[in-house]
């Protein structure tokens, strides 16, 4: 009995101590600082309990989260019955100071008050609020502390204030009305409806202009949503209408497990509006309608559109919301309109069609084909001339294009056929790697009339040319070029900006004819060309054999007075040139059995078509200095006869001339 009495005494003492600490003003004063510290740690604010009164059946608490933000809770409760009847009053007059507590930017004012009544088995919450200047009332029921029923009515909620509260820009303003009536929100036992509508809704054009650079005319809109929820089904009708865009959707949705059977339409008069949501910098109008049907494991999305005045349809199969397969047919997109929509310059007009069939659209496992076709293509020669700063106007250029792309895992293998009035391009296989963005391709280009390229080359040319090679673009650009020119061949390589070419057995007369230069010399030329495209500088080093000159004034003079037919001489020697943009500095050193021809630092200008060349011709030991100046095609030729007259041939001419004069007088 002694120990029992001692145990009961200790127990009574502990209970008494707990009672004193928890339910008396003296105990409240002792516990209050500890509770404040816990609240401050949780809220990370300098929170204070300005009122803390807790008894066996009543409580009255005032918590100041910080200046201008406070919560007041008072009411009665029963520990033994687990019941309560509590009133609450929340006044948050400066939400911005609670950002650390909310974990996101917030601003504005929020107030609500009401009553929480019930026990642990059933709770009712009734309250009202002025959320975003609205008149809001709500009734919530909880069973076993889980929400089971919600009834709420929101009248004239200010959308711009709500956006501000959520830390968002005030892109729009509207009065929002909402009725929520759920008898049951229990999983698989839904029973209720939602009605939402707006009035006086407007887009804030000033904010849109400032944030996105979009000029939006005065725009009003209206939104309506009616949804009925029964069991697992949600049947809804939604409309968003404005003078710029319209969105409608209706159908049935089962949230869990997900199942959809809905229709949608989208009509946007100004695609610029989407930039605020998608970030896509596009413009123009866009219309789309279609359906979304299926379950999470297999959902089919189809649609039709007239984008860029086309006839477009598509069907995509999604598995767990990821693309599994895609089919699309796009007919006759207007190229000019498509370029306008994506804010690209007006490169061309024409009609583009696409056929897409991708049975496996999973990343890394792509398979399928994409075919494209452009008909009646016309390049905008006025824009191209200006944009690429061509020295002369680009001619009118028509074209047609066909491509077929095979999707093979992480690679795209494309066949190309481009036929234009300037050139024809064929690519058998252009392989693009999606992982490293590298490209490897062959090509064959046929240019039927080289002179049509004058706008780009600034060099008049005759004839046609066929070029083939390979292109590799990874970290560096590597291009090979092979072609036959003037009975010879050219093999070239381009590495980024460094160009190298080997000329093998090129007929100089044919080359001069092609370049529309004076056809003075025929020989077989072997040469190497090194040229920096970025600097427009380079060198040419070559060697000629079997060289013969065509008829010219200087050689006629030599034939007459030196009695040497230079036209029958066979020359061999070196040619070289240094290129600096349009300026060429050339050297020539040719020798035959009896004669030689030399020139050093001959100046050629491909832009002005001017020449300045001093030639030293030694014909059978008889020197003749010749100076060519002016137009490359018809240069002015002057001959210095002083050195010639001192030679044997010159003395002979002088002797014949003296004999002629004596007879004359």
Image (spheres, helix red, strand yellow):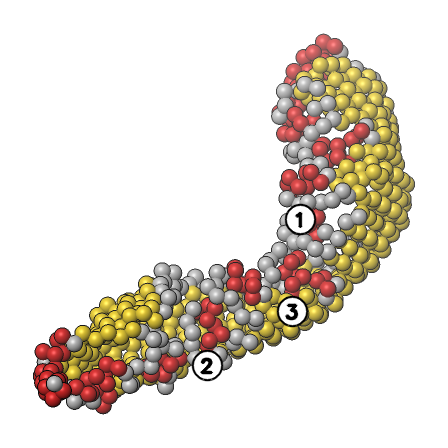
Residue linked to disc 1: 275
User: Residue at the spot x=81%, y=44% of the render?
Assistant: 221
Task: Answer above or below: position of 416 versus 477.
Answer: below
Residue 55, by quadrant, is top right
Task: Answer above or below: position of 569 versus 334.
Answer: below
Image position, residue 151 (x, y; %): 88, 36
Instruction: Tell me the mark number nearer the camera, choosing from 1 and 2.
Output: 2
Q: Are marks 1 and 3 in contact (CB under 8 Å)?
A: no
Give the mark nearer the N terminus: 1 vs 2. Answer: 1
Task: Answer above or below: position of 189 versus 53.
Answer: below
Give the mark nearer the N terminus: 1 vs 3. Answer: 1
Give the mark nearer the N terminus: 2 vs 3. Answer: 3
Residue linked to disc 3: 350
Image position, residue 335 (x, y; %): 65, 65
- Identify the element where label 1 is drawn: helix
Residue 500, by quadrant, is bottom left
Farthest residue, direction top: 26
Instruction: Tell me the mark number nearer the camera, choosing from 1 and 3.
Output: 3
Residue linked to disc 2: 464
Image position, residue 555 (x, y; %): 23, 84
Q: Left or right: where does residue 137 sit relative to residue 416?
A: right
Rendered-image quadrant of the C terminus? bottom left
Residue nearest the viewer, comparing 29 with 644: 644
Residue 427 visible? The answer is no
């Amino acid at each position: 009995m002694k120990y029992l009495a001692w145990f009961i005494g200790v127990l009574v003492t502990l209970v008494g101590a707990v009672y004193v600490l928890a339910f008396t003003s003296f105990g409240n004063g002792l516990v209050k600082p500890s509770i404040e510290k816990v609240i401050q740690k949780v809220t990370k604010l300098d929170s204070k309990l300005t009122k803390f009164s807790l008894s066996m059946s009543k409580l009255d608490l005032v918590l100041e989260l910080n200046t201008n933000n406070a919560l007041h809770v008072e009411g009665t409760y029963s520990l033994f019955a687990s019941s309560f009847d509590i009133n609450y009053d929340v006044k948050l007059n400066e939400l911005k100071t609670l950002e650390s507590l909310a974990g996101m930017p917030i601003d504005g004012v929020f107030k609500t008050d009401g009553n929480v009544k019930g026990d642990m088995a059933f709770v009712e919450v009734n309250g009202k609020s002025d959320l975003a200047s609205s008149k809001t009332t709500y009734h919530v029921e909880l069973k076993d502390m889980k929400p089971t029923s919600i009834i709420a009515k929101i009248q004239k909620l200010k959308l711009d204030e709500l956006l501000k509260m959520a830390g968002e820009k005030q892109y729009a303003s509207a009065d929002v009305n909402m009725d929520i009536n759920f008898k049951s929100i229990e999983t698989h036992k839904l029973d209720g409806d939602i009605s939402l509508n707006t009035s006086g809704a407007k887009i804030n054009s000033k904010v849109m202009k400032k944030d996105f650079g979009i000029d939006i005319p005065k725009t009003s809109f209206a939104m309506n949503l009616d949804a009925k929820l029964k069991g697992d089904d949600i049947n809804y009708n939604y409309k968003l209408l404005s003078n710029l865009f319209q969105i409608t959707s209706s159908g049935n949705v089962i949230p869990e497990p997900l199942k959809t059977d809905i229709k949608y339409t989208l009509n946007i008069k100004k695609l610029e509006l989407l930039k605020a949501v998608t970030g896509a910098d596009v413009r123009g109008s866009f219309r789309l309608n279609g359906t979304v049907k299926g379950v999470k494991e297999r959902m089919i999305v189809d649609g039709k559109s007239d984008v860029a005045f086309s006839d477009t349809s598509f069907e995509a199969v999604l598995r767990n919301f990821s693309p599994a397969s895609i089919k699309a047919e796009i007919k006759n997109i207007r190229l000019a309109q498509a370029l306008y929509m994506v804010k690209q310059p007006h490169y061309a007009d024409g009609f583009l069609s696409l056929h897409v069939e991708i049975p496996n659209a999973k990343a890394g496992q792509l398979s399928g084909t994409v075919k494209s076709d452009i008909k009646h293509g016309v390049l905008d020669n006025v824009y191209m001339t200006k944009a690429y700063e061509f020295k002369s106007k680009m001619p009118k250029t028509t074209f047609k294009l066909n491509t077929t792309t095979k999707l093979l895992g992480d690679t795209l293998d494309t066949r190309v056929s481009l036929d234009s009035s300037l050139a024809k391009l064929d690519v058998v296989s252009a392989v693009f790697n999606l992982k490293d963005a590298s490209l490897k391709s062959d090509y064959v280009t046929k240019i039927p009339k080289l002179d049509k390229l004058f706008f780009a080359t600034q060099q008049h040319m005759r004839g046609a040319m066929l070029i083939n090679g390979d292109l590799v673009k990874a970290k560096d650009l590597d291009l090979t070029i092979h072609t036959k020119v003037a009975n010879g061949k050219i093999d070239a390589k381009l590495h980024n900006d460094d160009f190298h070419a080997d000329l093998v057995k090129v007929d100089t007369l044919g080359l001069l004819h092609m370049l529309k230069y004076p056809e003075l010399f025929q020989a077989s030329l072997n040469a190497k060309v090194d040229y920096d495209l970025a600097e427009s500088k380079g060198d040419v080093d070559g060697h000629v054999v079997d060289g013969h000159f065509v008829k010219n004034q200087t050689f006629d003079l030599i034939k007459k007075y030196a009695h040497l037919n230079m036209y029958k001489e066979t020359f061999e020697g070196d040619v070289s040139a240094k290129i600096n943009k349009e300026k060429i500095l050339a050297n020539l050193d040719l020798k035959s059995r009896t004669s030689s021809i030399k020139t050093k630092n001959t100046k050629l200008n491909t832009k002005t078509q001017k020449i300045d060349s001093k030639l030293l011709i030694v014909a059978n030991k008889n020197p003749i200095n010749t100076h060519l100046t002016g137009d490359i095609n018809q240069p002015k030729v002057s001959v210095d006869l002083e050195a010639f007259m001192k030679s044997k041939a010159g003395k002979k001419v002088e002797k014949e001339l003296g004999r002629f004069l004596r007879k004359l007088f």
